[in-house]
Amino acid sequence: MTTVAVKPATMGQALGRALRDAMADDPTVHVMGEDVGTLGGVFRVTDGLAAEFGDDRCTDTPLAEAGILGTAVGMAMYGLRPVVEMQFDAFAYPAFEQLISHVARMRNRTKGAMPMPLTIRVPYGGGIGGVEHHSDSSEAYYMATPGLHVVTPATVADAYGLLRAAIASDDPVVFLEPKRLYWSKAEWNPDTPETVEPIGRAVVRRTGRSASLITYGPSVPVCLEAAEAARAEGWDLEVVDLRSLVPFDDETVAASVRRTGRAVVVHEASSFGGPGGEIAARITERCFHHLEAPVLRVAGLDIPYPPPMLERHHLPGVDRILDAVARLQWEARS
Amino acid sequence: MTVMEQRGAYRPAPPPAWQLRTDPEPLLPDAAPYRVLGTEAAASADPQLLLRLHAELVRGRRYNTQATALTKQGRLAVYPSSTGQEACEIGAALALEERDWLFPSYRDTLAAVARGLDPVRALTLLRGDWHTGYDPREHRIAPLCTPLATQLPHAVGLAHAARLKGDDVVALAMVGDGGTSEGDFHEALNFAAVWRAPVVFLVQNNGFAISVPLAKQTAAPSLAHKAVGYGMPGRLVDGNDAVAVHQVLSEAVRHAREGGGPTLVEAVTYRLEAHTNADDATRYRQDDEVEAWRDHDPVLLVERELTARGLLDEDRAATVRENAEAMAADLRERMNQDPELDPMDLFTHVYAEQTSQLREQAAQLRAELDAETESDGAGR
C-alpha cells in the first residue's frame, strides 16, 4: 500500500482543480466571465486556467452578466460546455432574464432537441464582511425556476466532486459557492482522481438521535458546531447536508427525520418565501406521523442583506440553532 | 496670488496623450437608406434574383394573410404579421448559406419559412401545441424569440463558438426597433464587436414598438448610427426594397465570414398591419401614413421592376400566384387538423433525467388521465 501525500487544500483550490481537470478532459469546456483570465478570478478560483488553456478556453469577457450568460447560451447551442462565473451573488441579477427565459427552458421549449449543458458559478452568501450587494443568498430564486439544477457544496471534496458533475451534466446547473468557505481547508489530495459526486444526493454529515438539522452550503459547518455544542445539553443532533437543492433528496431527508422525529431547517437566505418553507412542507408531507414537534426554521432575517458590521445578527449562528432545538419541546430522547 | 502661482506648488503632469481607437467615419451609415429598385442601379440587378425574390415575396405575403385568417378562425392564438416587411424577411434569409444560423424574433416566422422551414412547424408556437415546433440544429434556426433582444447574445455566442471550432458559419440576428432599447441589444453588440464575432444584426425598423413610435424610442440619428459606439459598421437600407436588403445583407454576411466582424444593419420599413390581432393600430397612427407606405409596398417594387424589364408576363405572374395559393391551401388544411398531444410530454423535456419530484407529478397526471378515460368509457 502506497502512502498518499495528503495535504490541506482550500475549497477554492478544489474548485479550481475541478475546472482544470474538466477542461483537460473535455475540449468543449470553456470558462468565461469577468476577471477569470489574467487575474484568475477575484477569489483566484480560475487561477492559471488562461495560462494553461489559452484565452479562447478561459475568457475575460466584457463586464456584462446578461451578455456573459446570453453568449454562453449561444455557445452551448453550438455544442460547447460553457462554465460562466457571476463573480458575486447580487451581480447575477442582470442575467436573470437569460437564466429564466432561456437557459432554464431551452431543453423544454425545443422538446429536448437543444439541451443547455451550462454551469453558472455564483459565489454566494455572507459572513466575509462584504459591502452591499456582495453577500446575498439568492438560492430561492433559482429553486423556483423549473429546468435548473441548484447545487451548493459545503466541503472541499464536494466542491471538486459536485463541480465536475455540474460541468458534465447535460442540463444547466446553478453552482452556488459559499464564499466564506473558500478558504476552509481539509486534508485533500489533489494528485489522485477525486470522486465525482452525483447531483441530487444529500448526505448525513453527523448521525444523531435527538433531532435532524437540515442544512446546506455555508450553514453546514455552523450546524456541525451546534451539534457539538448540543452534546452538553444531552442532545444528540443529526446533520443532513443537502448539497443539491434541485433536485431535492426527499428520501435522505425523510429517512433522517423519521429516525429523529424532529427537524430544524437551517439556512442563510431569508426565511419568508425561502428554501426552508419548501423543505419544511416536504418534511411534513412525508413524515407527519413521525413528527414529535413542528418543523422549525432558523434562517436569515427577512431583511435586505445588512451592512457587514451587523451581519452577525442576521446570519443563523449556533445559539439560534440551539434555541430552536430547545423549542422542539424536548423530552427524554437523548 | 492663486495656489498654483505659489512657489513650489504642485503642478500635475498633463494626462497622457489620448486618441480615438478607431476613426468613426468609415463606420457611419449613409444619410439615406440604400436603395436599388426605382433607381438606375436596378438595371444591373440579376434577373434570376429578381424573379426569385418576387416569387418568395408573393408567397410570403400570402403566408401572412393566411396566418392572419387562421387567428380569426381561432386556429392560432396570435399572429404578429410581417405584411409590408416581407422584403426584410426574405432578402435577409436568402443572404445566408445553408450552414449559417438564423436568430429570429417572434415576427420573423417568414424568414424561417424562407429558409425552408415547414410552414406548419413554424407556427407551432403560435398555435400553442409546443413552444418550438422544430429542431433548431436541423434547420439552423433558433427558436422564435418572444422576449425582446434576448436572442441577440445567443447569436453572438454561437457565431463565436463556430469560429473557435474553425467553421466559417455566420449568424444573422433579427430584432425590431423597440428591441434596440433593451439591455441585451447593447450587450450583444458590444460582445460581438469585442470578439469580432461573425454576426450580422438586422434591425427591422417598422416604425412602432406596438404603439410607441421611433421618436419616443430613441434620440439617435438613426438606429444604424448605434453601430459606431460599438466599433462596427452601421448600414442603412430601404427595408421595402428586397434587392437592396439582399445586397446589403449579403455584403455584411461576406464581411463577417471573412473575419471582418459584425455589422449592424437598419432596414427602414413599415408594419402595415397592427402589432398583432390583439392590437388596435388606429389608436396610434393615421390612415394616410399607412396609405403612403402601401405605395412603397415591397411586392409592388419588385413587380414594377420586373414588368419594366419585360421579365414578368401574365403567365409567369399567374404561376407565382398559383404556387402561393397552393402553399396557403396546404397550410389551411394542415392547420385545421387538431394536433395530437401527449400530456405526459410535459414531464419529458424538463431535465435530461426526470427528478423524483417530476416522477411523482407524472404519476399523478397519469392517474388523472386514466380516470378521464374511464369516465369517458362509462358512456356519460
Image: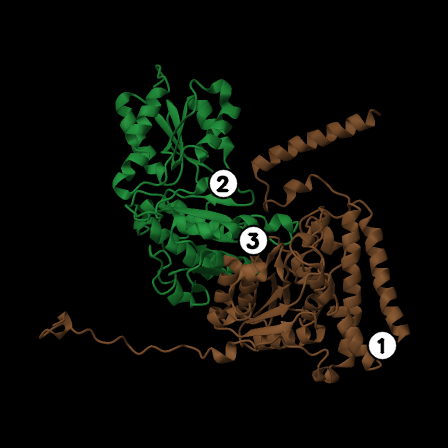
Q: Nearer the viewer, mark 2 or mark 1?
A: 1
User: Mark 3 highlights which residue?
Assistant: A116
Horizontal side of B91 relative to A11 (left or right) equals right
* Quadrant of the rendered image containing residue A73: bottom right
- For the point 51% across and 64% down, the residue is B219
Q: Is residue A160 left or right of residue A82?
A: left
Which residue is label 2 attached to? A143
Label 2 neighbour load within 10 Å: few <14, some 14-19, many 20+: many
What type is the residue that disc 2 sits on? Met
Q: Chain of mark 2?
A: A
| Amino acid carrying mark 1 in the image | Leu
As shown in the figure, which amino acid type bears the numbered disc 3? Met
Instruction: Identify the colour of chain A in the image.
Output: green
List x then y, in percent, for residue A332: 34, 14
Picture disc at residue B312: 1
Please, what secondary structure does the residue beneath circle 2 have? helix
Mark found first going from the N terminus, 3 or 2: 3
**View extreme (top): residue:** A332
